Image (spheres, grey):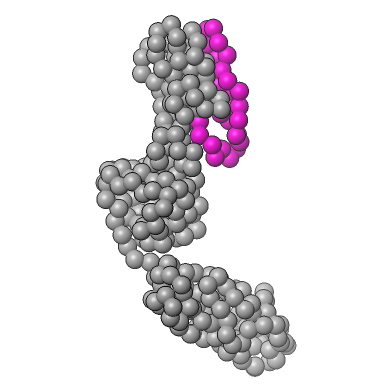
Amino acid sequence: MVSADGPGLEVTPSALNFGTVSPGGHSDLSFTMTNTGYGEVDVDVPATCGVFSVIAGGGRYTLAMGEARVVTVRFAPQSTDYAACQLDLGTALHGPVPLTGNPCTTVTIPGGTTISAGNTQYDHRDVVMSSKTVTIAGNHTFCSLSMTGSSVLTHAAGDTGGVNLTILGNATINSSAKVSAEGKGYASSTGPGEGGDQIDGGGGGHGGNGGWTQTSGGRLTYGSVTEPVTLGSGGGRDVNSGYDGGKGGGAIRLIVGGELRVDGGLRATAWTAPGWTQEAARGEASG
């Protein structure tokens, strides 16, 4: 930022991209800060930023008018994972300097794949899904996510961890694709708010009370109304007809650093149990 009436700070280049660096190796790149205005500029460059370290030009100091200082940053990764950090300069005259290394590679997940909690082969990659269903367990981090065709991302029924993804960049769900946890919560008559087995099974509770039927009341609430992270409970079984209640909705947690575009589906609703068409025949589940 340059000011004709006061101090200004110019940073060149404005970002550092270290490219691909093998684990155990390192790469050093530099940028120059120049006081281009009138008056002094106070800066405070931290010694580290994520996996990046400042090996020269760091610390707190003052730039006089026209003075320049070179800052050298080292990227010494211990893995091939994508790395990124915003190096703050400690001044309101200029924003942070983006640092990136080990760019993400693109990988397509085949339909029918189950990604276990310990399977990290898709982590820190630009992930593409083009067809069928992919089931995921545990916490995972993708660089980006592109869901095309009729692809579906879901979690196993009853998995309390749900779909738990961090997307560093953008996530796009095209019109025929969906992230779905429909009916992936607790099964009939199970869960903290289960509907209970009785004549005309009660509705499962979650963020709100479960629905009442002709002979029974729905179960009580649990979890958060505004930010639910727990699975929905199953509806009660109708002991008179023998029909099971519905299955609760699952859980989806997406943390997206860039843009989240949903043209398709993003659902964690309950699954309605088959059987009698009358609502009182079996308890509905909670989402």
In the rendering, at what x and y percent does residue 284 appear? 47, 20
Q: In which quarter of the image is the N terminus?
A: bottom right
Residue 4 in sight in this render: no
Q: Quadrant of residue 4?
A: bottom right
- Name the foreground residue: 3 vs 76: 76
Residue at 40% x, 77% y is 21
Tell me which corner region of the image, top left, top right, bottom left or bottom right, holds residue 278.
Answer: top left
Nearer the observer, 262 or 239: 239
Q: Is residue 282 magenta?
A: no
Q: Nearer the viewer, residue 182 or 90?
A: 182
Extent of the magenta region = 205-232
- The residue at 44%/53% (across/down) is 140
Q: Is residue 214 magenta-colored?
A: yes
Q: Is residue 192 above or below residue 29?
A: above
Seen in the picture, residue 20 relative to 127 is either above or below; the reply is below
Residue most extreme to the right: 39
- Is 211 on the left-hand or right-hand side of 37? left
Q: Is the magenta stretch mostly helix, strand or loop?
A: loop
